[in-house]
Image (cartoon, helix red, strand yellow):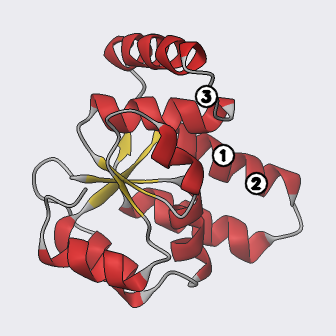
């Protein structure tokens, strides 16, 4: 998964997991290969947690490690923390909530100006976040044709 320049797409944990399991759609695989993608360090943490919970799943552990070697992992920064704080406050005022990890990933995508690639519909409630549903193959094909997907 070679990436030139800054990736435009940040994979949510469900997209990364689908790729690792080989269950990702062909358009999702094409998107990652052709346009580059990255993950948040939060997604890395979730993937590693999944391995720790299932120590007997040695093939899965190897697949996760191979995936993590091949994809850029964006670090959490002070700038991301500021975006997170503002986003969480804005969403609370509007009566909206996400799980803690989802909110961290959404803030990271916003900070990096990436489209979040996720099949999780909850991200549609995040103001200003561009989301691409990888499970909708036609949407993924459309994004693969235009890197400015939203």
Q: Which mark is residue 50?
A: 2
Tag shown at residue 46? 1
Identify the residue shown where x is 51% and y is 46%: 123
Relative placement, left or right, of 5 versus 129 is: left
Q: Does residue 81 appear left or right of residue 48 in this picture?
A: left
Q: Quadrant of residue 58?
A: bottom right
Question: 69 above or below 42?
Answer: below
Q: Are marks 1 and 2 in contact (CB under 8 Å)?
A: yes
- Kind of element beneath mark 2: helix
Residues at discs 3 and 2 in contact (Cβ within 8 Å): no
Sequence order check, earlier mark of 3 and 1:
1
On the image, the x and y values in percent for residue 150 come to 25, 56
Residue 96 numbered mark, or none:
3
- Which of the two residues, 10 or 132, is positioned nearer the viewer here? 132
Residue extending farthest bottom? 26
Residue at image point 42% right, 25% down: 76
């Amino acid at each position: 998964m070679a990436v030139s320049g800054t990736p435009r797409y940040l994979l949510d944990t469900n997209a990364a997991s689908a790729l690792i399991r080989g269950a990702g759609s062909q358009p999702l695989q094409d998107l990652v290969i052709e346009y580059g993608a990255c993950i948040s360090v939060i997604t890395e943490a979730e993937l590693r947690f999944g391995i720790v919970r299932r120590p007997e799943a040695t093939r899965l552990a190897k697949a996760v490690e191979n995936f993590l070697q091949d994809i850029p992992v964006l670090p959490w920064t002070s700038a991301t923390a500021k975006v997170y704080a503002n986003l969480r406050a804005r969403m609370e005022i509007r009566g909206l909530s996400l799980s803690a990890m989802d909110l961290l990933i959404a803030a990271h995508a916003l900070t990096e100006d990436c489209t979040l690639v996720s099949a999780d519909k909850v991200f549609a409630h995040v103001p200003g976040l561009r989301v691409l549903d990888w499970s909708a193959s036609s949407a993924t094909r459309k994004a693969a044709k235009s890197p400015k997907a939203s």
